[in-house]
Image (cartoon, rainbow, N blue to C red):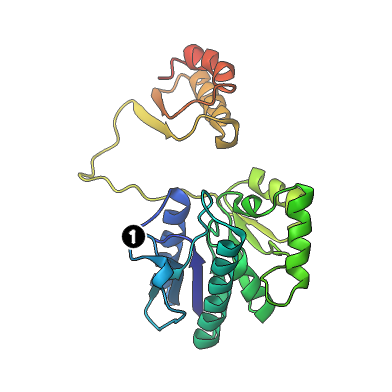
Amino acid sequence: MKILCISNFYPPFFEGGYEISISESMQYLARQGHTVYVLCGNRGVYDQASEPLTFSLDPIQRKLRYINYSQSSVWDKHRVEKHNYRLTKQACTLLKPDIVYFGNQKAISIAPSLAVQNLDIPHIFDIGDDWLRTYLATGLKARLFRLIKRILPFTIGGTVMLDPVLVPSRWMAEELQAKYSSTTLHIVPRGIEIPLPNPRKLSHPLRFVFAGRIEPLKGLDLVIEAARLIDLKSAQFSVDIYGEEDPDYAPVLSPAYRDLRLE
């Protein structure tokens, strides 16, 4: 099978575990005998303003442009959308992929998704966070602007149909169903590989680590509840928690830290 992966970043450039997870999925698919191509943004490569509208057969093409959220004008966003839309269509026409695998689309606009939808190419979204929310402001002005973009022939507009979808948790599946009416969802719990410089045997007692933002969406309450249940069985283990605390959420969890002697 020929697979085209489209993502905002691709290792060695990434913002977090989302992009690393996408690359590990692509590596796995390649090991299974599939042919994988990647179209991603040009972080760490060169100035995007000078990037020509060309797609070649190199396995990784870092040629998508980014929306500059801090300084971008309507015209700047339009240029990013137009470039990414045309480049995606060019890639699909040249490669003729059997399926397009969408990773994190934040900052590259919804143009690549719309291009693939309009070409009616089979595709799937691997959702690690709610990137679509960044494109769907709820104000009247934003809604009117999206409507105009759907009507005018020289703009890139439309509705992204977030289907089918791979998600890492039941919570994410429920969110996508409620917010975007996704219907075909596949829950595939997974993490990312963290290679140890010197592989060693497991320590005794077992030591677990939570690293991430301490906020409701990260599910730390589930970690604490699991630790409580394990503690009731008198298992020997410890949990270390590292991360920046949400000021409203931290007081809720602090007593649990102390009760379970979590650090």
Q: Can you give x and y, in whole percent of width and height, for residue 229 in the image?
A: 55, 24
Q: Is residue 152 left or right of residue 242?
A: right
Q: Can you give x and y, in whole percent of width and height, for residue 228 in the image?
A: 53, 21
Q: Is residue 229 left or right of residue 262?
A: right
Which residue extends farthest left? 198
Q: Quarter of the image containing the C terminus? A: top left
Residue 162, quarter of picture: bottom right
Callout 1 crowding tier (Cα within 10 Å): few <14, some 14–19, many ≥20: few
Q: Is residue 120 visible?
A: no
Which of 80/119 is in front? 80
Residue 252, quarter of picture: top right
Residue at left offset 60%, top offset 66%: 78
Query: Which residue bears the numbered disc 1?
Result: 44
Residue at left offset 46%, top offset 19%: 234
Secondary element type, mark 1 = loop
**Residue type at numbered disc 1:** Gly
Q: Can you give x and y, in whole percent of width and height, for residue 77 in the image?
A: 58, 62
